[in-house]
Amino acid sequence: MNIAEYFRLSINALMANKMRSILTTLGVIIGVFSVILLVSLGSGLQSYITNQISELGSNILFVIPGKIGGTSGPGETVNRLTLTNVKYLSERLQGIALVSPQIGKTTTIKFANKSNKNTNIWGVSANFPDIIKTKIIKGTFFTKSQEKNGSKVVVIGPTIVKNLFPNTDPIGKKITISGGKYTIIGLSASRGSSFGQNQDNIVVIPFTAAKKQFSIDIANQIYLSANSPALVNLVKKRAKEVLLTRLDEEDFTIMGQEQILSTVTNITNVLTIALGGIAAISLLVGGIGVMNIMLVSVTERTKEIGLRKALGARRQDILTQFLLEAVMLSLLGGTIGILLGIGASMIVAVFFVAVVTPWSVILAFLFSVAVGVIFGMTPAIRASKLSPIEALRYE
Amino acid sequence: MKIDPVIQLTGVIKDYGSEEFATTALHGINLTVYKGDFIAITGPSGSGKSTLLNIIGLLDTATSGTYLLNEKDVTKINEDQQAYIRNREIGFVFQSFNLLKRVNVLENVILPSIYTGTNKTEREKRAKELLIKVGLEDHIYKKPNQLSGGQQQRVAIARALMNEPSLILADEPTGNLDTASGNEIMTIVKDLNRQGKTIIMITHENDIAKQAKKLVQIKDGKVL
Ligand SMILES: Nc1ncnc2c1ncn2[C@@H]1O[C@H](COP(=O)(O)OP(=O)(O)OP(=O)(O)O)[C@@H](O)[C@H]1O
Ligand SMILES: [Mg+2]
């Protein structure tokens, strides 16, 4: 008997029980579908976050207060990143890196009778746009001299434009921040949101103005930008040396993009695997469905098996027929599941993030084949071992 | 001229079950069947007729004794070799027809030949010829449950003939049929014998048994 013959036999048997075949296939479809979709979501999320971090630029370093992985958490230490220390750092890194503090707080800003809540006020240096990519869509950023003079000028983000200036041109208008009147000189482009934080509800002012306005002297963090990617490690080393002359080891942490990336990647990897694992369980359930149906089918067709054996079918003929039935069910389910999974991922990608990963497709495919072979094996072997006369007598 | 024995059974014993529920269905059967024979096996219910026929047809194996089929000892061959013999040398006809309900008449007749590996068009041609021979040319594409009992049994006979076996085994082929249909079947069976097929048939009915060339009576697992 050739292979086409075996296929014909199995297809006929499956077609004879269409509804049951469809329902069995459905189990595998759902399993494969969810594996692909959930893994796509996981990897989509991962690449989205990775992109967000990469957008910061590879030259960037952050100095944040406190020691990560030290005895006391970042929140517990006294922030000793004073503006004097920032200035000192800036002088010492002259020629290899740009330095900007970020000081300020979150408050409500007002214009006329309107107000905008929870606005992040960032007091930074004039070189800030050279460190953190900041696109100015209208107007200008503040200058070195405006920084020096502590000018009350402000660059506002899209959220503020939307809320306070729905119909008017904000440039030249004065907004109130903590009682101080600031002249709008520029509008920054949208940064979207990252890590659940709105990056557009931000106003940027000279750190000198912020210092006076809020009577604070401590930076929330310090941005460093090495003049070239090759200098990043040197800058990191030097910055640490410089800061250690004034601060203790526990007072600060210097983080590069790579560290952030690897931390985040670790988290998202775990997330992806967890999602995939959950989906794999449904695939397993689908596989057990295939086995269940095959067992029922063997029992139900015991007489048929007896008849086929009486007419000359060998053990391997019966084995092949039943195994093929199981494999075809799971392969069909697997293929449909893959197509649906890829389709759904593409649809999700339009609204959210999802990246179809080849390994998840391959894995799902192999899994569905394995499901067919493994779960079809037991019933098939059982069927093939029946003695012809006993199978024929079966009612 | 010496006629070759097709079947030679010597001291065939068949035990069923184990220990407590053990029954002996056949108590040392000796039987020789020659080429071209037409044998009717009769006997009371439970006497072991079906058991004997199943052993002859290699559907079951004897507990002890020897069985030579075409002068070859078939008690020692493996499962695949048994399947091979069932496929090519033996045609079965059962009391309850045993047709596959989900496929049509033609596919049912073709069934034995798919395990032989003959080419598809050839086997369809042969199946149709056989169906014409048993008078079912108008029912080739019907499903078995659209046919009468007599018609279904004729499909079963066509199926038994598909691989041109020399030996036809029939276990009460007319047992589920009325007299008229039974006679139709007997006409076909006798015709087959006339064409040279060796036939062993179990029956309860005297009228049927009389039409065979030889009578073998069985009682309590022994040939009388
Ligand atoms: N699978 C089995 N397990 C146990 N005992 C069996 C089995 N098959 C048959 N027997 C026993 O063997 C004996 C012979 O049975 P068999 O079917 O050969 O009788 P039979 O002559 O064909 O009867 P009938 O005319 O009713 O068909 C009976 O006593 C029966 O109970
Ligand atoms: Mg019987």
Image (spheres, helix red, strand yellow):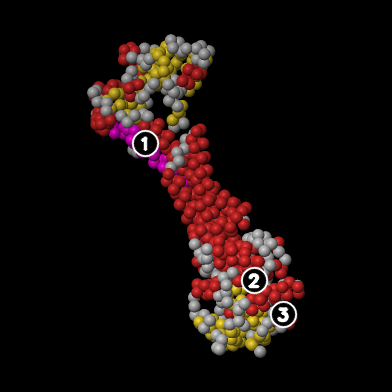
Q: Does the image show residue A304?
A: no
- Where does label 1 land, which residue? A261
Confirm whether residue B140 shows in the render: yes
> Alpha carbon of mark 1 to alpha carbon of mark 2: how far?
77 Å
B13 to A116, vertically: above or below: below
Mark 1 residue type: Leu
Ranked by sequence position, the earlier of labels 2 and 3 is 2
Q: Residues within 10 Å of mark 2 (few under 14, many from 20)?
A: many
Where is residue B198? Give x, y as percent.
Answer: 61, 79
Q: Nearer the viewer, mark 3 or mark 1?
A: 3
Dot 2 falls on a residue whose secondary structure is helix
Q: Is residue B194 magenta?
A: no
Residue closest to the eye, A306 or B154 = B154
Question: Helix, strand, or loop for circle 3?
Answer: helix
Q: Nearer the viewer, residue B124 or A80?
A: B124
Look at the image and give the residue range highlighted in magenta.
Answer: A247-276
Question: In the displayed structure, does residue B173 sit left or right of residue A197?
Answer: right
Badge nearest the viewer, 1 or 2? 2
